[in-house]
């Protein structure tokens, strides 16, 4: 099985310091929806792993998060793709849970659900916590410059050997052209 795991905010959609708290606030990054559809059509399973502490902070409820994800899924399906799973952590950073990235809990849950280890599976993110979580789950991290990616490039000490791409579309193009190594 070929699988790619994507962070949501900053990779698929525009991020907001004020959180994405309604379906109307969910705005895809140009090219990201087409990139997901392209991965799907190429035979990849596409899964989203996202921290959503806005739930724990009381900024949105589970129903609203479901409607945001329905909007994301609808936009991908209109382009001929699909998302095979959405895994999220609803906890605040101070809750010290195992599912909030940089902890590997969400990624381990994905591995369990798909009955596979994550060796050779790319986790595409825009922040250091995505990179750290990927490494802790024995997956391959990749960074995009969208969202917090440019800031992460300047500030992170965790990027040795991590491939960097302008955006999700550039990652997908490179992966599908077989120029990106998988183990």
Image (cartoon, helix red, strand yellow):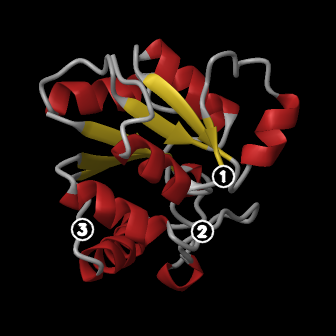
Q: Earlier in the sequence, mark 1 or mark 3?
A: 3
Tell me whether the residue at label 2 lies in contact with that at label 1, contact meaning CB atoms closer than 8 angstroms.
no
Q: In the image, 97: left or right of 1?
A: right
> Neighbour class for label 2 at 10 Å: few (<14), some, many (≥20)?
many
* Image vertical order of residue 8 relative to residue 106, above or below: below
Report helix, strand or loop for mark 1: loop
Earlier residue among tags 2 and 1: 2
State the quadrant of the C terminus. Answer: top left
Q: Quick check: 104 above or below 74?
A: above
| Residue where numbered disc 2 is placed | 20
Please tell me the numbered disc located at residue 81. 3
Q: Quadrant of the N terminus?
A: top left
Q: Secondary structure at mark 3?
A: loop
| Residue located 12% across and 25% down the image | 115
Mark 3 or mark 2, whichever is nearer to me:
3
Q: Residue at x 35, y 79 (%)?
A: 75
Foreground pick, 126 / 40: 40
Question: In this figure, which residue is indicated by the disc labeled 1?
Answer: 166
Looking at marks 3 and 2 on the same chain, the residue that comes earlier in the sequence is marked by: 2
Element type where label 2 sits in the image:
loop
């Amino acid at each position: 099985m070929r699988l790619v795991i994507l962070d949501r905010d900053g990779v698929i959609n525009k991020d907001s310091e004020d959180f994405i708290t309604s379906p109307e606030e969910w705005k895809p990054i140009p090219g990201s929806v087409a990139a997901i559809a392209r991965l799907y059509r190429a035979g990849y399973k596409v899964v989203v792993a996202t921290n959503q502490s806005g739930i724990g902070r009381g900024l949105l409820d589970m129903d609203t998060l479901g409607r945001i994800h329905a909007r994301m899924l609808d936009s991908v399906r209109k382009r001929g793709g699909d998302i095979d799973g959405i895994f999220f952590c609803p906890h605040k950073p101070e809750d010290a849970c195992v599912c909030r990235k940089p902890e590997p809990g969400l990624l381990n849950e994905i591995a369990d659900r798909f009955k596979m280890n994550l060796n050779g599976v790319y986790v595409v993110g825009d922040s250091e916590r995505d990179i750290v979580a990927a490494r802790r789950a024995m997956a391959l991290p990749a960074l995009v410059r969208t969202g917090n990616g440019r800031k992460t490039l300047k500030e992170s000490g965790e990027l040795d050997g991590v491939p960097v791409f302008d955006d999700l579309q550039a990652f997908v193009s490179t992966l599908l052209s077989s120029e990106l190594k998988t183990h």
